[in-house]
Amino acid sequence: MGFFKKDKESKNEKTDNGELKAGGVASSSEIEMTIDSIRVSLGNYQRVVILKEKEGERFLPCWIGPTEADSIAVKLQGVSVPRPLTHDFTCAVINALGGSVICGVINKLENDTFYAKTRLECDGGIIEVDCRPSDAIAVAVRENVAIFAEEKVLEKAGVLIDPETGNPLESSSEEVPPSTEPAKERISAFSEPVQSIFSIAENEAERVNCSYVCTGHLLSALLSGTNIATEVIKSVGSDPAKLRLDIETLLKGNTEIEGGGTGLTPSVKEVIQTSIAEAKRLGSEWVLPEHILLSLVRGSDSIAANQLRNAGINPEMVYVELVRFYTRPLRGLSGK
């Protein structure tokens, strides 16, 4: 049919030790990456594929779905499956039509979402097909071709990781966006821990005869238990118990915080809406305590945001720490 070139000679070359090297398949702004590992959040079981700069020290964490993670892991581990997976089928179609995969490229980061493309050889020329990062990676590992990331993507989202502890050392830019795949369209519900936090916040307000619930009550309730949010706060050098005590001291006798009134303050309503958006960006079907923390720290002029800032906590720090908590290794899924 003429859709693909029949000559399947690859434009990629092998080094003496068998490692793939790029043979004119990437632009000067595209940095070759290797798959360091596939990891999982122990809190919500979200998967993260960790890419590492081949000739550098930067890492690029990409949140992906469990199905896509399994598809990549199956190939990395050499596991045989009884029937072709979706990415096996994709590669088979390309090869059956005489085409060849040149490489996968993570090329863009917009609105906290990563974009990618798979570069193909077609009819003597090169075409690029838009796709998710997980799809580009899954196809690349099956065709044994290189994976690249645009330098501008690494500048925004790359992190340096301590090889001994696995902890991020610093961000390679001012911000580390957390999202990798297009956000899920809707949230199933607030998780049970978050519902409990809301209930505790209401009880805190009632306990001090307060007619409204402000972000201070919400942060105090968040800090009353043990969750990823409190672990993040500890990991940046703050004491959740002291922070909670400071908030309670500020709340005592103050009846006009965040406008006062009755019910939820406008700042709390904003936090609730923002937490839903944060959950979507992180690919979660549930609003979790860490999403509440991200929403609180993003507040413009609320008591919780001010207290978190006074404690030296900002959104970028929270995101970097979440990378660490969301990237606990899954045994046997290393790409090395």
Image (cartoon, rainbow, N blue to C red):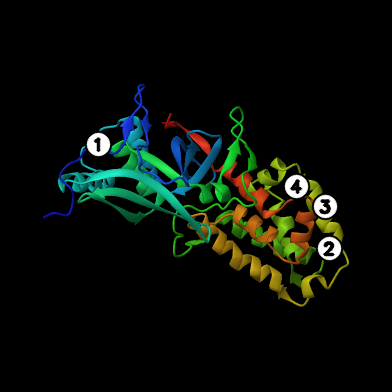
Within-10-Å neighbours for mark 3: few <14, some 14–19, many 20+: few
Q: Residue at image x 42%, y 43%? A: 148
Q: Name the spot of residue 24 as percent of width and height, x first.
A: 36, 41
Question: Which of the two discs, 3 and 2, labels the residue nearer the N terminus?
Answer: 3
Question: Which of the two discs, 4 and 1, labels the residue nearer the N terminus?
Answer: 1
Are the residues flagged by discs 3 and 2 in contact, CB closer than 8 Å?
no
Q: Tell me, for residue 81, which label it has, or none.
A: 1
Within-10-Å neighbours for mark 4: few <14, some 14–19, many 20+: many
**What is the distance, in whole Å, between disc 3 and disc 2 at their CAs?**
10 Å
Q: Amino acid at mark 3?
A: Leu
Q: Amino acid at mark 4?
A: Pro
Query: Where does label 3 land, which residue?
Result: 245
Within-10-Å neighbours for mark 1: few <14, some 14–19, many 20+: few
Query: Where does label 4 land, which residue?
Result: 240
Query: Where does label 2 land, which residue?
Result: 251
Quarter holding the N terminus is bottom left
User: Which secondary structure, mark 3?
Assistant: helix
Question: Which of the two discs, 3 and 1, labels the residue nearer the N terminus?
Answer: 1
**What is the distance, in whole Å, between disc 4 and disc 3 at their CAs?**
9 Å
User: Which secondary structure, mark 2?
Assistant: helix
